[in-house]
Image (cartoon, grey):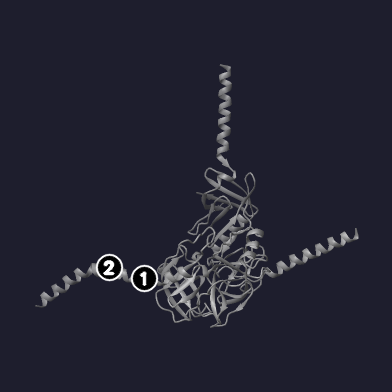
Amino acid sequence: MQNMNRLIILLSTLLTLVSCAGGIKSNPSSLVDTQWKLLSINGIPFEGKSQPTISFNATRASGFAGCNRYFSNYIFTNQGQINFDPIARTKMLCHKRRIRRLERHFIAGLRTANAFSIYNGILEIKGREGILQFEQ
Amino acid sequence: MFNIAKAICLLLCLSVITVHAETTLTRGDPRIIGGEIADFGDWPSTAALFVTKKGHEEGTYSCGGALIAPQWVLTAAHCVKGEQATNMFVRLGTTDLSDNQAGERIKVKKIISYPQYNEATFDNDLALIELKNVSKIKTIPLFIGDIEEGTPAAVVGWGTRNVNPFTGEGFNPSLQLYELQLPIVGQAQCKLIMEDIRNMGPVTNNMICAGTGLGGEDTCQGDSGGPLMAMQNDEIRLVGVISWGFGCAKPNTYGVYTRLNKFSKWIKSSMEAKPSNDSEDSEGGAIFWMLFPFFALLLAYKARRID
């Protein structure tokens, strides 16, 4: 009976650990072949039509920055660490100041990013210029 | 020991000079990032693309283009992505966008993006715009064959004229057309710099690069879709379409353009394809035939009353 109790405790501990690990993902493979839409920049929710996006394949991130399109060959430097620099962009004119600012903050957020995590379906990219949050 | 100290001093001095040179070349150079105001008539086939809000006459400038046939403008696919023909018009025959009356203003009839345009790699970044009316402006022919490395080329555009030295981002768009001369860069050299050193790309065979690599001279935001031109057989011809880059006018990068000689067959066949029906005309025709029985009955009724 005592052995049975020990086994139950061990199993439940294992189960808890596994479920916690499943909550926050920061391994490179969790990003590959995913597409995301910007939710917020530094906690300020995105509102409007020109919603920035990001898509990942095995080596490259690309998407829409609000006005121009961009791409970057991203690298994982360690578990949960990511680097997007340099970022190439098309050369359209962004007339609205709000969109220009959005694109500038978005690109700066990616360019200076150094970590990412996925939790509860939210991708968070963090770096010197702040936090970008995305949903699928 | 003294020699090592001298060498270190020399290296430090060189690095300071290099950093200074990079910042002075890119910081706030008050032109299209190099270049000068274009004279009226020098680049007649240059087009300005405008996007309007539904139901509005006025539009906002978004991209450049080139008139390659009286009813056709060539531009970048990313310039027309998501746009509807009915919400676009093109201005031709002017270098000054502040003068709303100058030159021609023609509505867009149809947009044809290159079917294999890849928005993740910017490969095949090309689109044709069919105009509703024929333009009277001089058209530009396409460059035939491959252009040699080092050939002087010209780019023109209404794009931003200043660069933020920290972000490499352009600001302060121009209402005057600016022109800039840049050499064509060999494919191997461009791949070396952009792919191997800058870790960007791929620079595909459908792309062509131009620039000095020194910084300070480049196209920038607002120049997309505009022409890259060079002389061939004593006339100015269209070599490429302004597409993408890493910031603007940064040292050790080049501007990347759509290489048009790879698309000459598609361009020709698209323009020669059966003309599209004007959507407004088709709608008008449909409404007429729907209402025809009503009008016929009305006329018959009136005729009987007169009798």
- Asked whether disc 2 touches disc 1, contact meaning CB atoms under 8 Å apart, the reply is no
Horizontally, residue B285 falls left or right of residue B173, namely: left
Q: What element carries label 1?
A: loop
* x and y percentages locating residue B156 in the rendered image: 57, 75
Residue A133 has which mark? none
From the image, which quarter does the N terminus of chain B lie in? bottom right
- Who's the residue at 52% across and 44% down the image? A121
Quick one: label 2 or label 1, which is nearer the N terminus?
1
**B116 in relation to B91, above or below:** above
The residue type indicated by label 1 comes to Lys
Dividing the picture into quadrants, the one containing residue B251 is bottom right
Residue B286 has which mark? 2
**Residue lying farthest right?**
B2
The residue type indicated by label 2 comes to Ala
| Residue that numbered label 1 is attached to | B274
**Residue lying farthest left?**
B307
Q: Residues within 10 Å of mark 1 (few under 14, many from 20)?
A: few
- Between the C-alphas of marks 2 and 1, the distance is 21 Å
Horizontally, residue A49 falls left or right of residue A125, namely: left
| Residue B51 seen from this side | no
- Who's the residue at 67% across and 59% down the image? B197
